[in-house]
Image: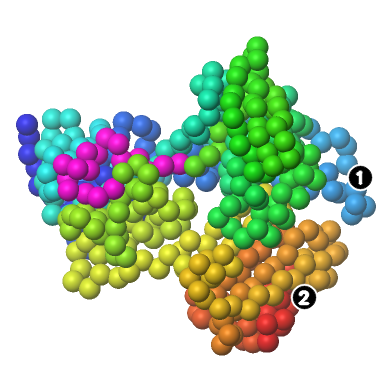
Amino acid sequence: MVEERHELCVIGAGTAGFAAAETARAAGRDVLLITGDDELGGTCILRGCMPAKAVLAATQIEGEVEKAHDLGVETTPVHVDLPAIVRRKRALVDYFAEDRVHDLESYPLVRGDARFVAPDAIVVRERRIVAERFVIATGASTVAPSIAGLDAVPSITSADVMEMTHAPHSVAIVGGGPIGCAFSQFFARLGTAVTLLQDAPELLRNDDSDVGRAVREALERDGVVVVLDADICKAKRNGDAAAFTVRTPHGTRSVRCDVVLLATNRRPRVDSLDLRAGGIDGDAQRGIVVDATLRSVSNPRVYAAGDVLGRRALVHSAAYAGRLAATNAFTGEPRDAQWDRWESHALFTQPQVAVVGLTEGQCRERGIAVHVATLPAGEVGKALVSDQTDGFVKMLARPDGRVVGIAMVLDDAIDLAGEAIALLDRGATAREIAEMPHLHPTMSELIARVAERLV
């Protein structure tokens, strides 16, 4: 077996792994990239953020056109051309992937599954690789929920949706997180009968209940049937379709559909790594267990970044973690990860969702005292003249006035998130925000107006 040595070995060539490799190479380190035999590019480019947003953009435009009559614009009946949407999505993926593949191939690149054989060594096929430091960035994979009979029914994932050229007549979506919510609206606007099954009291369980409730109300206006506290007892095949028995606080119900979209959690991809041989604490439930600097708690040679950490699956935080892991791996003064700054997140529904900084729930868990103010979207002129009155802005501030969280459910929430992030990053107080100039009429006035309520 051939043995080779490197300063840094990065296992995984998605967003986090690529960011780690770029950072280390820029610092003059000798970097080797290991990636599996799948198509190069990473989840975001190939099956996640970019293709999903390309597909969702089409039905979001369809939703805007449907509202045109309310603004005095008459349109012909709207038709969504699903094959054309898929063709456009594929072209965009090819465009994004081409640049990333070119960048990845500029590294020494080994294809195959890496397996630790010692704390400082891995094997990939017939190559033994010894490294001073490792960054594990193997990502995560979709996990089917444990439901009796699920194997027998026709099911798909979000990646399959992005290749569909014909909309099903009916779909049941299991999971009320970001993927489930976004594709519920997508299918509903294609004319598909949608039932969304969520095993929690509200959608978007990791956010505050008012955010989940606002999204649920928007989905229900689009015709989605939302079933909360849904305990799916069993599934069975019914001809070419599927049937679920669902227990809820209001009784047991049957849900029938042509296809099932599994939009449940992903789990860290670590099964092939043989973590025990590498002296690495972690598993498929917890991911790689690291300290605040992203260093393995049990093997000081190893760092981890991205979805394999078992945190929120966010591209910007994966890239941040990759850069931080590579930097900390070779510095005498490692820095702690600043998750509160980097786990701001968004949901591409209509209205959109953007959550920046801490939520009310996180503040309660940490014992952080905050004052809370909420302002409906319709309180500013731009929302009224543009018929964008759905949703709200919520701001959380400590007793000293420093703002620690902003949640927005608005048509322009994702673009407004940039301002919210900048304000929190600079430690702005509610008074300072209220006194900042904001153009009129714009949706950004909501940020200043809600801050006024905390002064």
Total of numbered circles in the picture?
2
Can residue 272 be found in the magenta stretch?
A: yes
Indicate left or right for 298 with 173 as reference.
Answer: left
Query: Residue 160's spot in the image, x, y percent?
Result: 55, 29
Residue at 41% over, 42% down: 267
Q: Is residue 374 above or below residue 3?
A: below
In this view, the residue in front, 386 or 151, is 151
Q: Horizontal and vertical percent for residue 181?
A: 64, 44
Residue found at x 71% / y 49%: 216
Magenta segment range? Answer: 266-282
Determine whether the residue tagged by mark 2 lies in a helix, strand or loop: loop
Choose between 227 and 115: the one closer to the eye.
227
**Colour scheme:** rainbow
Other residues around mark 2 within 10 Å, as few (<14) / some (14–19) / many (≥20): few
In front: 169, or 23?
169
* Residue 440 badge: 2
Q: Quadrant of residue 214?
A: bottom right
Q: Which residue position is annotated with label 1? A: 74
Q: Is residue 50 visible?
A: yes
Label for residue 155? none
What is the quadrant of the N terminus in the image?
Answer: top left
How dense is the environment of label 1, judged by Cα within 10 Å: few (below 14), some, or many (20 and up)?
Answer: few
The residue positioned farthest toward the top in the image shown: 239
